[in-house]
Image (tube, grey):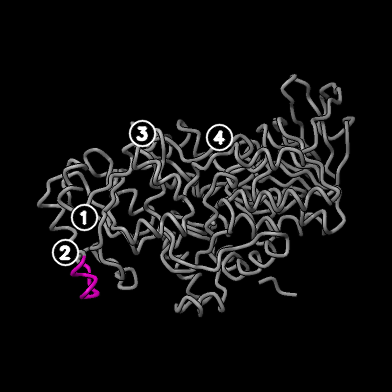
Amino acid sequence: MKYNINRRKLLVTSALSVLTPVVASNMSVAATPQTSKSDRSWDETFDVVVIGSGGAGLTAAVTAAEKGAKVLVLEKNSFVGGNTIVSGGAFNAVIPEDAKKAGVQDSEQLFFENTMEAGGYRGNKKLVKKLTENADESVAWLKDHGVEFMDYIYQVYGGLHPRTRNPKLHGGQSYIKALMECAQKLPITIRTNSRVVDIIREAPLEGRVIGVEYVTPDKRNHFIKAKRAVIAASGGYSANAKLCGLFDPRLEHLGTSNLPSATGEILNDMIDLGAQTVGMDYVQCVINKPKDQSTYVPLSIFVDYFIFVNWDGERFIKEDAARDVLCNAFLAEPKEEAFSVMDSKGFDVHCKVGRVEDLLKKSIKTGIVLEANSIEELAKKMGVPVSKLCQSVEAYNRSVDDKADALGRDPKMLVHKIETGPFYAARFAMARHHTMGGVLINEDAQVIDRKGNVIPGLLAAGEVTGGIHGNNRIGGNGIADIFTFGRFAGLTATK
């Protein structure tokens, strides 16, 4: 049978009360560190050991367990879900019936071309093909495993084409909740507060990966043998400001939209084993809250409803540009900030379809979201020149009529005028979001070493890998990536 995802500042705690009871308690197995990597005593043995309990890790674990493998998932945080649980959940996939219902033309070939072009043609063609031709199967696989999707596709911010869908519940929490319910019924053991400190290979740069060492908060070390494979699904390094700054000095002073645990230790462990890396200087930023605000408000998601203006009240970038282009434009502004501006129609869509009505209405009361009965009044509240903002909105509205935009916005994103009051604005800055670089994998999610050979027994999936997104990830492709290559990692581990 062919199986045919907004920002990461959602509250983790709202999901933990549902998910935590499923997680197995940490096992306090005493262990004495051994001097030999390949000739040691092991505390326990599993068929497959998965590092990380985000979307990629849980998908790999469930897939492998359904093929009969006994699986251990190790998570360094005190809760499951990784960055997936705080994601918006935007998922790109080409599903003909969804496109037809939305009245858009789409194909896997166009998906491939969009991904390659957005990534500066630096993506590995074989990996991109694998993603774009199998993302629909990942959607179907998730549906079969309890995830319900909204009956609506759209073009997410940075998405380049209307092929994005979201789960019905609260973003990425939907995926984790469903997968945890599946894990509870399978031979899967999940241990939180379990930080992997070593991936064990038979010899420093050769032989098979045979297990892992992890440490618990009581500082006890545990050695686990993996009979079939170790799967690294530990996420990226966007929370590691120093590391990101080494590759792009502009980014070190920025915040991150991700969990503070996204620091890249497992990536470094695999490098120590001889793994090849690609694209380590490709660090993507996304719209996030300015540093002087306490709350991020998702009021820049549905591209066809808003414009970006700077502190001069002028549009400075086409809103449907790729994320790297948007980031460069924001960082070139004197304050590295901009506003999204929309009318009541756009605000309602963000409330209802984005499912953040309570947050947005609360943010009006706190002044984070600005509301006004006219563009002139809105400009005064924003602190931008009134005449400039009025001119910007008027020019944009004319472009909707003419289906031609001076900044090059795609005609299909020139649909909704900003004309129906009340009017709204929110201020944004950039934050480190996704690291496109990581270990090189092949189409079966096997990790490749610096000589171009497979490292036996070592697989990887998700943001810890590189080579898929090139130098810029399309919005909605990250979720497609974790579930697609998570499935392939799980399958390969059982072969």
Q: CA distance from mark 1 to mark 4?
A: 35 Å
Residue 118 position, x and y percent, is 42, 62
Q: Amino acid at mark 4?
A: Thr
First along the sequence among labels 2 and 3: 3
Q: Amino acid type of disc 1?
A: Arg
Residue type pointed to by label 2: Ala
Q: Nearer the viewer, residue 162 or 450?
A: 162
Q: On the image, numbered disc 3 is attached to which residue?
A: 293
Query: Could you tell me how far apart the alpha carbons at marks 2 and 4 are, in whole angstroms?
Result: 44 Å
In this figure, which residue is indicated by the disc labeled 4? 263
User: Dot 4: within a 10 Å radius of its alpha carbon, few (fewer than 14), some, or many (20 or more) residues?
Assistant: many
Q: Main secondary structure of the magenta part?
A: helix
Q: Which mark is residue 315?
A: 1
Task: Indicate whether residue 77 is drawn in magenta.
Answer: no
Which is in the foreground here, disc 2 or disc 4? 2
Task: Give the CA separation, mark 2 to mark 3.
Answer: 30 Å
Local SS, label 4:
loop
